[in-house]
Amino acid sequence: EEKLVYCAGASASGKSFIAEQLVEQLEKKGKKTLLISSDSYYSNESQMKYLLYGTFDHPKLIDYDTLESDIRKYFTNGVFELPVYSFMEKRTTQYITIDQAYDIVIVEWLYTVSSLPHTLTIKGSTINPYKIVVHAPIEEIIFRRLVRDQARVKEPLHTLIDVMSNVFPM
């Protein structure tokens, strides 16, 4: 029986790290696990929307309809095209065909728990995703966010600090 896990939390809270550790532990126990980062589903208009919303963490930058559709395709047919988003090029640069059978699918991003369905009905069966919410102290989040974003998008430090005022209310 296939399982679905949603992993959510604040920007730079450690979601990706926790999800990767979970994959590692599950695979040690013989479970084949697919990790999907919602970062893959950034809209190709995300740069324009970033300017409008002042942050890459706004939920309107992620194409949740396509993400949900791809999750449904996987659980229905076992195949979908996973987009690869480049932060440097600010667009989807390629697609990877996912066509292997997995015991567990983990989807991680800020709004995963609130933006994806709480139950999925596939071929008459109901899938109730497990939900993990990651928390971290604000000081750690700020530090991680500054280090990660500067490495990811090469923006000047003062620009990243300005963005923080938009990030934390979310």
Image (cartoon, rainbow, N blue to C red):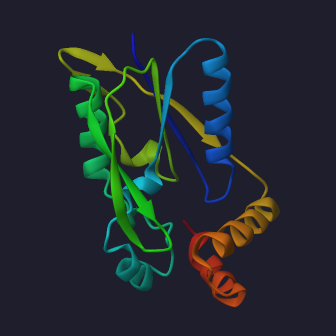
Q: Quadrant of the C terminus?
A: bottom right
Against 111, residue 126 (above or below) is: above
Residue drawn at point x = 64 percent, y = 77 percent = 164
Residue drawn at point x = 63 percent, y = 37 percent = 20
Residue drawn at point x = 37 percent, y = 73 percent = 46
Against 71, residue 4 (above or below) is: above
Answer with left or right where residue 96 lies relative to residue 35.
Answer: left
Name which quarter of the figure residue 118 lies in: top left
Answer with left or right where residue 55 lies relative to residue 76.
Answer: right
Against 24, residue 52 (above or below) is: below
Name which quarter of the figure residue 119 lies in: top left
Name which quarter of the figure residue 116 lies in: top left
Number of on-image labels: 0
- Residue 29 percent location from the top left of the image: 64, 12
- Residue 75 percent location from the top left of the image: 28, 25
Foreground: 85 or 61? Answer: 85
Answer with left or right where residue 3 lies relative to residue 126.
Answer: right
- Residue 3 percent location from the top left of the image: 43, 20
